[in-house]
Image (cartoon, rainbow, N blue to C red):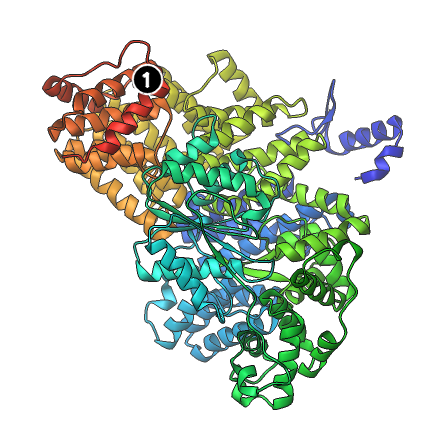
Amino acid sequence: MWGEDARRLTTSTVHTVVARLRRRHGPGLVSTSEAGYLVPADVSTDADRFVALAGSAHDGTAADDAEVCKQLCRQALALWDGHTAYEGVRAELVLAERTRLEELRRRVRADLAECLLRPDATRPDTEESLAVARGLLDDNPLDEGAAALAMRAAYRLGRQAEALDVYEVLRRTLRDELGVSPGPAVCEVHADVLAQDAGLGSAVGAVATSSGRAVEVHPGRRLPMPASPTVGRSTEVDAVLAALREGRRLVTVTGPGGVGKSRLLVDVGAALERADRTAEVVHVALSAHAGLTPAELATGVAVTTGLPLEGDDEVAALVRALRSADLTVLVDEAEWALESAAEVAAAVLAGCPDVRLVVTSRTPLAAVGERVVVLEPLATADPEGDLEAVRSAPAVRLLAERLADRGVAPSADLVTWSDADLRVLARVARRVDGLPLALELVAGSCATVPVGMLLDLASHPLDLAPEARGLPDRQHSLRDTLSWSLDRLDPDARAVLRRIAVFAGPFTTTAARAVAGGAPDEVDRAVRVLARDNLLHVERTAVTLSFRVLRTVRDLALEELAASGEEDLCRARHRRWFAGVWRDAPLSDALVEHVGRTHDDHVEALVAALAIGDDPAAADLTTALCRRWQFLETMAPGLHWTQVLLDRPGVTPRQRARLRVARAGFLQAADWSLTEHQRLAADLGGDFDWGTLLGLVSGITAYGEGDTVGARARLDEAERLARTGAAHLVAEVVATRAAVDAAEGRTEAALAAAHESLALVGSTSSAVQLVTVIPKVALALLECGRPREALDLLTAAAADAGTRFGMRPTSTVAMNTGWAALGVDDPGTAFGWFRQAIVGPQATAGPNALGEAACGAGAAMAGLGHPAAAAVLGLGVWLHTDAGQALPPALERHVRRATDAVGCTDPPRGWTPDLAVARVTQLVRGGSGT
């Protein structure tokens, strides 16, 4: 509560305050240890209760029950007294937590409005739903999710005109404030209103888009959506596409900063997808950090695109993950890590024959086989020359288009412009050398300035900062324009810009409030001004608007931040925000999506926390990152960072226990004794989420080692904790118990548990449940002799994951599906799934998991009469046995039958697991399955 003033406190003052707290709230509120005072984990505040209720309403099993969800939302909102969390406490102490709680309150209000519209609600209250949604829009007129809710509620009440008015107000506001159009989710609701869709009034999930994806779990598999059309670049796009058609596997687009390389890259990706709807294109931006090592770059690519990484060599692991992929990787702004990008590109091109790279960089990668496409600034025209030449100049057309987008000009059709205004546009375009970014900035600045005022920029070049005098002329033009744009900002907006420049990637207005400080509505206004002036780029998820500081703008803003003396404060706020946003939160789709989208900022905050010795914040950041890495089965960064944090002295016992559990997940086995298990359970006392995970990972380890008695004991513990305080994990625990029951031959109990787990999941599984629950249920069904049911469940889940979340099946899902196909005597389908688990883009590389996959692949190859079946079987059995694992009985029967039919060739004496893995990969990749 004292902040920096605590440095001047005396020991007796602290003793006095603690004594008062104990007298008022009881002696258990604050405990004393050798390390100092501690508020025990079982001490709960109203904020803790609010977060727990909000989580249960949104992500728990209660979210599927409208009445229970409504009750939880109302209970959570009743804990609030006023609109500000920690009212009266200085912002420097609670800014990040205050911002997090207030944003969570918005989500609870949205959940309540949704529940009130649900068809399964006992008494739907559409009027209240509309009032809540309208209130959310009053607080944030750009909230597209709230607009969709309000439109649905108004339509259900028979007020179609009001629903359409909500959309029109949103559309105008988005255009005026940000220069963008409404997103696909709210547009779909608008179309349904116009069509008078009978199902709209009772539809659940207003946030789903036409693709069905409400959450993008792999941001790299979604191309950025430009807010406006591209002008004058069709020739360059065609040149890149032609190079790819010719068989070039590395095409580098070069050019100066601000010339439009990033936009061209997105246009190339969109053209590839239009030409072939099955084409796979991923997008990776490297502008967030300078000086990435090859290992860091490989990890970033994997995490962004959802690829698993296993092993100590991240570059080699990335190559393994992509070795059989057929896709185009778009890599933006490679100049910030040029040497590392060249090294990783060379490794991928050498080891992944069907992967193509399209790279943007201010300089080429200088790699063998590289085709370079040079992107020049847009052509300008002589301002005093022929007016037809002025109208046809691409730079003039782009400026006119953007002015029309901003509503400054009546039309982008240059025929309607006066001769005088056309010549102004030509002067401005020539003044900034036709650089597209500079033209965008000028158009953004003109939102509040008459076109004629642009002559100021054309006629009065700004003085360059001393450090910029050595730049090429085109860079002079860009820096001039950036400086001019910043100089036009009001002081508040300029202060916000330099503060939010600490973000490495995309951020929401909520995150901006947590870092910039000041009044929330003033920060929101400043962000909108900066976006309108094109100093921020607007990005979309399915339902969320976020922003990104352009790299060129960020560099200049960071210079101002350093000069202002605010850099340490802003970076501390940045660190606190990302450390706190998912603190104590369970695994959920929202967490997976957000940590993936802001991965660069999470890692940057983590590195900063370690640099200043803030171990507790670093542990919270690592825990959040581990949630996503585990979801992706990306082991390498998880193993690295958990070990780094476990070696730090300032990590609390509870955080240390969480990290041990997370690390066991990456190791795919618990690495502790029974005594250590008990100590970890004590450290996690009252933490039902991680306590349940401790029981789960211990139980799964025991199950894998053939100790079903020990597995049952650990799962009993996990189920008790889950049913007490971690309802979101009950389905996974029950599914795991079903697998154990089935392995023991308790068929009736196993089937009952499997069907209970499916009932808990519901008809619309979350992305997390598709990864954590469904494979375990399928395994239980396999053990119970229900392979057809397991195969149908898994194939449906795989299709659902792809349609709704853009996810490929993980290696675990692929393996279980392969075993199910073997169970129905379909070795061809089985081999396809096992092959995907071994050499596909989501392939596993760990000896344990790969050993199981090789056993299945060998059994499938035996059924197909493949000559390499015996060798693959021998390698699989050897790898699985060497890892100390045993196949479940139902799976072991397939292997035994295949071995009896074709034999089992042991690997040569002295082989290592790595050599065996490499040989399995070679044999399975080379086999066609026939």
| Residue 36 as seen in the image, left or right of residue 52 | right
Query: Looking at the picture, does residue 317 appear above or below residue 210?
Result: above
Residue 431, image x, y percentages: 67, 72
Q: Nearer the viewer, residue 32 or 819?
A: 819
Query: Looking at the picture, does residue 415 appear above or below residue 270?
Result: below
Q: Which of 629 and 872 is in front in this view?
A: 872
Residue 450, image x, y percentages: 69, 82
Query: Looking at the picture, does residue 828 appear above or below residue 236?
Result: above
Q: Is residue 344 visible from the viewing direction of this image?
A: yes
Q: Nearer the viewer, residue 575 or 18?
A: 575
Q: Is residue 309 visible from the viewing direction of this image?
A: no
Mark 1, Cα crowd under 10 Å, few <14 / some 14-19 / many 20+, is many
Residue picked out by circle 1: 885
For this orientation, the residue located farthest to the top is 909
| Residue 662 as seen in the image, left or right of residue 189 | right
Q: Quadrant of the N terminus?
A: top right
Residue that appears at 26% across and 31% down: 779
Residue 48, image x, y percentages: 61, 40
Q: Quadrant of the C terminus?
A: top left
The amino acid type of the residue labelled 1 equals: Gln
The quadrant where residue 866 appears: top left
Residue 610, image x, y percentages: 67, 31
| Residue 539 as seen in the image, left or right of residue 222 | right
The quadrant where residue 20 appears: top right
